[in-house]
Image: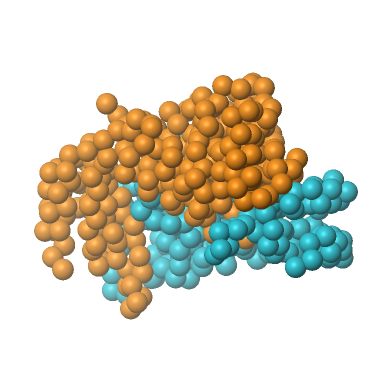
Chain colours: A cyan, B orange
């Protein structure tokens, strides 16, 4: 059985404007790979209602799971929860279970649960909460869409809360062979192996050496570890270092 | 006149598998911001023919410019050029101008221009070449799609070759105010300013302090530098440090 498919939607202007280098995509892609989910696509979009709704609908229709990050805080540009509700045509309002979580958290820290903070208890009807052990305000799962925060420490904690409850697939075995030869020399033998073993995925990720010459990391991935190992050995034999 | 819109398409499995942390998206988004392009969306997809063609067609229809990275090397998984040609319904083959560039480069380095390397001279009919001062093999522009390499040093060099020839817009002025208060406290005054100045974009990017408390970077962007400055000053006055 093929592994469940996944997409990620990163919501917020900070990456598109060049202000911030992505961290959540890198974190989630690694976790999904280990848990046996096949991440097919990532989209980064701005805090724009129409863009969020249409991206969520497209990705939710094409994938088993969609993971979002960003836009669930208390400020005016935090519109993700309302957009997810609209994408699924569900009502949304402050929900008691989420409000109780915020009340308990802010009572402990002596912070006022003002109108802005209360926006973080807006949860679509039918959604299940995702626990946030870092700053309390929960994420949620609606249908096959998992809605999480953009602050990396909070995003990572929510992924930890969420992932063990999802049914993944067989983690793929991956091996990398570093070859200090140009891709143009590697391409022939590698292409022949890729044609001979269509059940494995083989990628070539070139890099530049300090001396200006090129090399490439060849990554072979598949469900069968012995097969992966055998292909790596044959490739290594073609390029004695 | 609004700034020209742009999208980026990152092609390749290495980011989706969690193997590599993105660098090209971060580089391009900063350059586009400075040159006055409005980057609306980034998509990351795998080396899959159908996925590449449909993403290119969708993004090219919705944006003034599309920038791609990855998949134009000599190995079997480098299928971007053929997919771009298919997306625009153009023929593609080894083109003389591109082959001459490779011949001259490899003659200098004493490398054989074998069949694999010659694939890098496959350029769609009607495309203009993008110069590659690092490793010679060119990128190309077809219609409003700019096709560049995935290796960061080569990608960056191609962006340098390409961008000065494109007509951008007014670079947006951006100022950041760091406020060491929770977003829930900032949200009210910030939301009022956002409503008062709809021609400016205001974002709140929260972070966690070492002591476990929260702060946020408030970013105000717009074409009018004086207006941006004035809003930053009003916001600062609301939150004396």
Query: At x 52% / y 28%, what residue is drawn?
Result: B128
- Left/right placement of residue B112 relative to residue B27 reads right
Position of B188 relative to B65 (above/below): below
Q: Position of residue B181 (x, y in %)?
A: 25, 66
Quarter containing the C terminus of chain B? bottom left
User: As rendered, which of B21 and A123 lies closer to the eye?
Assistant: B21
Query: At x 28% / y 69%, what residue is drawn?
Result: A111
User: As rendered, which of A240 and A190 lies closer to the eye?
Assistant: A240
- Left/right placement of residue A230 relative to residue A146 reads right
- Left/right placement of residue A95 relative to residue B203 reads right
Q: Position of residue A178 (x, y in %)?
A: 70, 64
User: As rendered, which of B120 and B84 lies closer to the eye?
Assistant: B120
- Left/right placement of residue B170 relative to residue A132 reads left
Residue most extreme to the bottom: B211
Q: How many marks?
A: 0
Evaluate whether residue B19 shows in this view.
yes
Query: At x 27% / y 52%, what residue is drawn?
Result: B219
Evaluate whether residue A98 shows in this view.
no
Position of B146 relative to B15 (above/below): above
Q: Position of residue A79 (x, y in %)?
A: 39, 45
Query: At x 67% / y 54%, what residue is drawn?
Result: A182
Quarter containing the N terminus of chain B? top left
Q: Position of residue B145 (x, y in %)?
A: 51, 31
């Amino acid at each position: 059985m093929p592994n469940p498919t996944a997409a990620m939607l990163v919501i917020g202007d900070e990456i598109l404007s060049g202000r911030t280098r992505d961290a959540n995509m890198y974190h989630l892609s690694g976790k999904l790979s280990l848990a046996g989910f096949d991440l097919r696509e990532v989209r980064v979009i701005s805090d724009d209602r129409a863009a969020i709704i249409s991206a969520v609908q497209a990705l939710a229709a094409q994938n088993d799971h969609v993971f979002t990050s960003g836009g669930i805080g208390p400020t005016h540009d935090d519109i993700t929860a309302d957009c997810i509700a609209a994408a699924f045509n569900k009502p949304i309002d402050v929900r008691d279970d989420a409000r109780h979580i915020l009340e308990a958290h802010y009572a402990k820290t002596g912070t006022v649960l003002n109108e802005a903070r209360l926006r973080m208890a807006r949860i679509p009807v039918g959604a299940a909460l995702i626990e946030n052990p870092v700053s309390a305000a929960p994420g949620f799962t609606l249908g096959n869409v998992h809605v999480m925060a953009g602050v990396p420490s909070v995003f990572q904690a929510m992924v930890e809360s969420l992932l063990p409850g999802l049914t993944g697939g067989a983690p793929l075995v991956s091996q990398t062979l570093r070859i200090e030869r140009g891709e143009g020399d590697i391409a022939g033998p590698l292409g022949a192996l890729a044609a001979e073993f269509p059940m494995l995925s083989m990628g070539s990720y070139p890099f530049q050496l300090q001396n200006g010459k090129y090399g490439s990391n060849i990554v072979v991935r598949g469900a069968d570890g012995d097969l992966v190992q055998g292909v790596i050995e044959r490739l290594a034999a073609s390029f004695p270092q």
